[in-house]
Amino acid sequence: MIELEDLSYTYPNASEPSLKNINLSLEKGKFVALLGSTGAGKTTLSLCLTGLIPQLLEGKLSGRVRVAGKDVGKNAVQTLAKVLGLVLQDPETQIIGRSVEEDTAFGPRNFLVPAKEIEQRIDQSLATVRLTGYNQRLTEELSGGEKQRLAIAGVLAMEPEILVLDEPTSELDPLGRSEIYDTLTDLRRKKNLTILLVDHSTEELMDKVDEVVVLNQGELVWRGIPSDLLRNLPLLRRWGIKPLPVSEVGWEFYEKGWISLAEIPLDISSAESLIRGLLPLYGNRPGHPLDGVKYLGKSHNQVQQHGENLRSKREPNHSEKVLAVEIKDLTYQYNSGKSALRGINLTINSGEFLALIGQNGAGKTTLAKHFNGLLQPTSGEVIIEGMNTLRVDTSELAKTVGYVFQNPDHQIFSATVEKELEFGLKNAGYRGSEMKNRVAEVLEYTGLEPYRSVHPFSLGKGERQVIAVASILVLKPKLLIIDEPTTGSDWTGVQTMMALIEKLHSAGTTIIMISHDMDLVAQYAKRVIVMKDGEITLDGTPQEIFSNEEVLRESFLAAPQLCKLSLQLKDVLGPQFFVKASEFLGMFESGEQRGC
Amino acid sequence: MLEYLPGDTLIHRLDVRTKMLGFAGFLIVSFLFQDPMFQLGIFLSAGLLALWIKIPLRRIWGMMIPLIPIIISIILITGFTFAPERFERDSSQAILFYALPGEGLGATVGGFLMGTTFILRLISMMIVSSVLTLTTSMEDFTQFFQKMKVPAEVVMMLTMAIRFIPTLDKKRRQILEAQKARGTKFKEKGIIGSIRSYLPIMIPLFINSIMMANSLSMAMLNRGYGLTRTWTTLRQLTFNSRDYWTMALIGLGLGMAFYVRFGLQLGVL
């Protein structure tokens, strides 16, 4: 269905090609994932398939692209749209109509499909993406997940034979993501569509796709079945693709020589049986099953100790409790009278690392915006480092509370990175050498030094995200709120960002992180707050939160893979609950010492 | 922004062309008469239409409130600036009082009446145009433009602009919040100061709009826009008997208005 021959492409004004000699052919009816880090050329490749490159975007293109037997070079984008539907990254700019129906009809109308048939197609495609009955709804009122599904419906209404989706889930919450993936699985089953899915997350893809293609720096570096790739951790790391958490545990066992490569688990149940199998073997000298049982009890204590060590390390300055945030009976209502926050009581100590989780619309961002006065309580009060947000202006609070928003492009406006960083300081009244020093310090701290006099928009999204954080850090906030710091970043970008946040946290900054990425929350946060319908439903350590399946399910959240694994191993772990790969290894490390 | 208000009144069901004619009729009648009493009549009939379609009063009221200072200043300005010679009737030429000593800057009765007329006219127009936009879907408007031989590109541009108003407004709010969180103050003094304080909003807004426009153009091509010069019309405009009746009524009303104004010489100041 898709044939690429020696495809190379260089964007106008770019020195390096974005795609280098790509050869690829995909068969009809296959569901293929295209993986790779940011800047690997995934989006560029999908634009080549539709003919948008080179028909809309110029630049240097060589090689041949054939889609469903049509030569992309010789057919207009609009003609190709009949056979290949592309769903772009941002649903917002793909929705053309004001009502759902109007939008879905847009494609077929351009193809002069008769009105009667369009009506049928609208209903059909809306049903496929589970938006039946939404016909008259206004598109601007849809949620993020609904918009994303509408974008898919708009393409489906044109009845293409191939569907290409460019990171369709990057901005969605776990529920929204699973809805998209379910939709794709449905599509594949019912319509026998050829699907090419561009993505950088892997967890949900595992059992759904037939094949994986990996791009790295414009080159096609790997092609095969997903399990082969997901078990090969060094490759994933090299290409900046996030490995499955359970496979990280498995890889460690493999490196120790305990299991073969093919035994690395890719799902929770196989990880569970693997660990159960390994415990008696490597918890003690092999071949002494009785000792193994004894060991089990002992290791238990050691693990417990291990856990306690971790915990005491985690909560430093517990003696000197300083309140960073104090919220009393906070309620907030929109102008429409709809209440967004109801009776929030919350105290956050100085130096905490707190994560706010919950479904889209649960009130996380609304709550966070109260911390720096962007929103004022309808009733109740918010006191930040002794300042009541009702009485202190946001521009004053900005010196104490840093707020990094999800989209860095909403705040970047200077011609160089350096000037962008100076902006906040100028607002706070800094001038001259003190300003320069602070900027230099933060540039160094965040690793932006090489880009000092570069235009921010010439950098990638991941770097712009860091600039956004840096421009807040110059103000040396005591409290840092980060709203979805990793949306749309690849795994490497996520790790850079989290390392930076972790560094700030250990330097004493109070961190409040809003995130949909449960793996990150489990790994980094020390305290987790679950929100649902404007209320706090749960407040505790990641261990406590992620072992409470009931509340998580009610809040439409899912525990990360490793936490689920912990739950499965409850009988072995006893009161212990592990959230990190290293903790699982702790069960064995001590055993190994004994063995030596 | 007033949006389509779904409903099933006669006005909703009328053809968009009939409604446009009615709108024009209101406009003409309103400009025929200067006498506030006549304007009051027009205002009341506009109000009846509005009640008929169950207009969301709260939103209309929200639109009116910011206009109050304008309303007051219009009355004051017309009151003082309309010279007595501009009025035909003696009663209108009467001068109420002088604002300045020595018979300077006189306030005429006619001026104040004229001011009242302006305001009633303004409000009636607001009501009538709201009735029009609230009862007519975007689709109908596009059809109307097409029938009026407006080029398809222009129609597309108009629809898109309307579709993206809320999106851009959301962007603007997000940018405003992001910059506020960095301590931006929006109350700097002087013209330069106030321009400078809006740069942090305007620049990202421009950049974001350009980026959005880029991906929008991709999305449109992707969905076959521009393949042919036309597209499928989903709903054909058709005149019904109710449209003919309404149009006859509009014609009758217009005729009467002209007769009253020019035949009977009523409604002037």
Image (tube, rainbow, N blue to C red):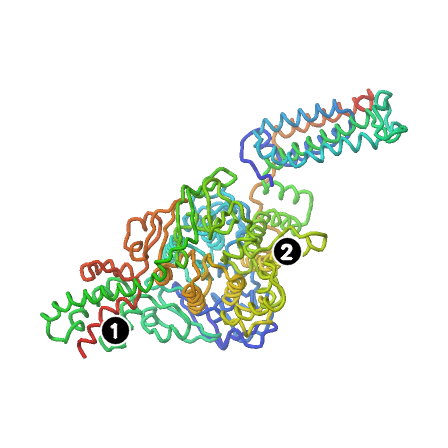
Looking at the image, the residue that sits furthest to the front is A320
Q: Amino acid at mark 2?
A: Met
- Secondary structure type for disc 2: helix
User: How many marks do you count on the picture?
Assistant: 2
- Secondary structure type for disc 1: helix
Residue A93 visible to the viewer:
no
Residue topped by disc 2: B202
Q: CA distance from mark 1 to mark 2?
A: 55 Å
The relative height of residue B235 versus residue A51 in the rendered view (above or below) is above
The relative height of residue A34 versus residue B3 in the rendered view (above or below) is below
The residue under the point 87% across, 21% down is B90
Question: Quick check: A100 left or right of B102?
Answer: left
The residue under the point 28% across, 52% down is A548
The relative height of residue B13 versus residue A115 in the rendered view (above or below) is above
Q: Amino acid at mark 1?
A: Phe
- Which quadrant of the rendered structure holds the C terminus of chain A? bottom left
The local crowd at label 2, few if under 14, some if 14 to 19, many if 20 or more residues have their Cα within 10 Å, is: some
